[in-house]
Image: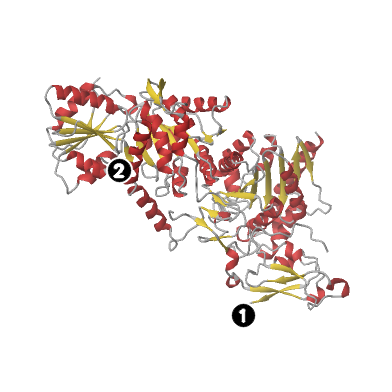
Amino acid sequence: MPILPITYVSTSTREMSSWRTSKPIIEYSKCTRCAICWKFCPDVAIDLVSDPSIKSPNEKFSSLEAPLINLNYCKGCGICATECPFGAIEMVREEI
Amino acid sequence: MPLTIPREEYMQQGHTACAGCGATLSMRYVLKGMGPKSAVVVPASCWSVIPGELPYTSLKVPLLYTPFASAGAAISGLREGLDAQGKQDYNVIAFAGDGGTADIGLQGLSAAVERGHNVLYVMYDNEAYMNTGIQRSGSTPYGAWTTTTPVGSKRDYKRENKKFVADLMMAQNAPYVATAAIGFPEDLERKLSVAKSIKGPKFIQILSPCPPGWNYNSADTVRVSRLAVESRIFPLYEFRNGKLTLFKPSKTVPVSQYLYLQGRFSHLYDSEVKVIESAVEERWQSLLRKEQV
Amino acid sequence: MESVQSHRKIMTGNEAVAVGVKLAKVKVIAAYPITPQTTIVEELADMVANGELDSKFIEVESEHSAMSAVTASEASGVRSYTASSSHGILYMHEPLHWAAGMRLPLVMSVVNRAIGPPWNIWGEQTDTFNQKDTGWLQIYCESNQEAMDSILLGYKIAENKKILLPVMNMLDAFTLSHTSEPVDVRNQKKAAEYVGDLELDSKLDFKNPAGYGSLLGPDGPFMEMKKDMRDSMYNAIGTIKNEISNFNEQFSAELPGLTDNFMMEDADYALVTAGAISSTAKYTVRKLREKGQKVGLIRLYFYRPFPGEDVLKAVKGLKGLGVVERNLSFGQRGPTYEDVATSLYGRVDIPIRNYVVGLGGRDIRVKDFERMFEDLVEGDNEIEWVNVGVK
């Protein structure tokens, strides 16, 4: 077989965290789990997880899937913080 | 709360797009809508770099890279090649930037649509040659700074109007034409499902804001996209069976609100903003008239 | 019993090419019309329209798109074909590199025609000599029979897993393309068996989705890929020779080797040619031989890979060699001269002369070849323009 310009390895096998200058922190007590942050993440760095141990504003929300930021992939663009209708995401400067 | 767009991801993490890249959201949404039985053709553009260098790929569907002017012809060839093998049920998608669509690739696009192949051509419109460093394209709007319309002391910003490729596709009477914006993903998903149901050439132009190219904070990508629609500078419409349907945003904002958020328009005087505002209004009225026909 | 024999038919070069494409069971054709290629694609369109050929036919809007379309269809895993000429092949230059770099075993026919300005639709080979560095193998045909057979041979060679590079088949404008000759039409069943089905290991795979043709930096295997392409072509000569003898055996055909050596055994002086002008050159050789002159001809059937060792073997013992170009490089002697001289450099010491002939369809007559043979006695030259400014 010749050496071909064909690529198979998923980029999800590598980290992009070094690109980030600030990171999103979710204040779960304000998070209604609307998934808007998940919807608008260009880095596909927000997972939706079922985890009863994650805090929620009240019981109504605790059974819903919560957003969980995967800092391996997050480039810190801040779209999630801008778009969160509840002000539940804050961008925090990364320490060097 | 049920998700408003499909959950499945066919664009993966770890790609090398800039933080806050609108073109990346476009790809993510397009693949969610079109699903795993798809192949994507990408001509020279940011998206020939975003999936990463060898050995990486960031899509869960086959991705065929082509020269700059080749997208329209490559989707034609790929479609016919797959059909010849009985793979009519696979989607063939071109995913090209505005340079690759409005400029160097326009002939190939127009011909592919004229020939009527069963393909979807997505133009991710970030309104300049971003991969080469923000040079003006035919799709750059009037008034914008780019590195080849650098304003300078002679106020040499882009003096020509944006070429709306979707309008050209309407003029060609393509079976399905739509404009979309990443700030309205549910609308885009609906349009993709319509496109999927139509046999023949489909064209969708997605406004895909670019933080470094438009010079705004990366956190504002979705906001900028929404303002483009609400200010009517980038109207959302659908064209099917010769009939235009224009989306009228419930909330409208002045064009200046859209312009002021972006450094590429920061040199404009109020009088120049007024010129843009009246052009936007004129185009809106003309689209309304077309809708009535 | 069904006959597997060839049957003889009178046909033009372009018809012979179209029949060759049909014999090779091509599945996707994309083409744009250009004189004098048009009758190839008209013929193919007829075959598709009449159900004789089960193939998709894409009527593209340009040659750039023709090559881009067949590159994509071949990448999807089906045998694909296009044909062009002159300005069309120049317009294709970029996707030609792309097709070869993607290691896609396409076959394309090119009817060699002059490049403008001024506009000129007649024979000349500059169009494809300009493509010699694109990673495509190049075959220059002398007859309509070769034009047909080289399509089948071309796919067989291109799709060989040790080679996996596209093949460009040339025939001269009008002299072959529009001139009728008797051709042995190969049996369809036998031809289909000979080429088999395309098995492209690197075709688009929906089960294991990959990027095809993706980005590479200076430290990635970019140079290694280019080296691999070069090695695959350069080392293909042995495989090509085997494939040619295999073809000749299967079809009782008479394809030459990579070079066609004509009356070279005891020759003192010889010319190197490519394409249809070689027939006139052979006639001249025979005529001069009858007069007792020990002359011969080396016709390049393959130009890429360049059969340097074969040329070297053929020229041993010569007192003078002339390289005839039906193409032009403005700032240097002709490309064939350079390739021949490179192959002989430091290994034999023979004076080599260089001739430019037949540009824009200018006639190349027996007396022109006679003059070239006379001229060879004089030793080296810079470059000689044949039949120019003499009207």
What residue is pinned by disc 1? A95
Residue at the image position 50 percent from the left and 25 percent from the top: C43
Circle 2: residue type = Phe
Q: Nearer the viewer, mark 2 or mark 1?
A: 2
- Where on the picture, by quarter, is residue B265? bottom right
x and y percentages locating residue B135 in the rendered image: 55, 52
Element marked by disc 2: loop
**Towards the viewer: B21 or B248:** B21
Q: With respect to residue B179, does C139 lie above or below?
A: above
Image quarter (top left, top right, bottom left or bottom right) of the N terminus of chain B? bottom right
Q: Is residue B129 left or right of residue C346?
A: right
x and y percentages locating residue C296 in the rendered image: 19, 31
Q: For residue C19, say whether it is visible.
A: yes
Chain designation of label 1? A
Residue furthest front in the image: C1
Circle 1: residue type = Glu
Report crowding for label 1: few under 14, some 14 to 19, many 20 or more residues within 10 A (C-alpha).
few
x and y percentages locating residue B82 in the rendered image: 60, 42
**Towards the viewer: B206 or C155:** C155
Residue at the image position 70 percent from the left and 68 percent from the top: A46
x and y percentages locating residue C371 in the rendered image: 18, 25
Element marked by disc 1: loop
What residue is pinned by disc 2? C306
Report crowding for label 2: few under 14, some 14 to 19, many 20 or more residues within 10 A (C-alpha).
many
Chain designation of label 2? C
**Towards the viewer: B6 or A8:** A8
- Where on the picture, by quarter, is residue B106? top right
- Where on the picture, by quarter, is residue B246? top right
**Towards the viewer: C31 or B122:** C31
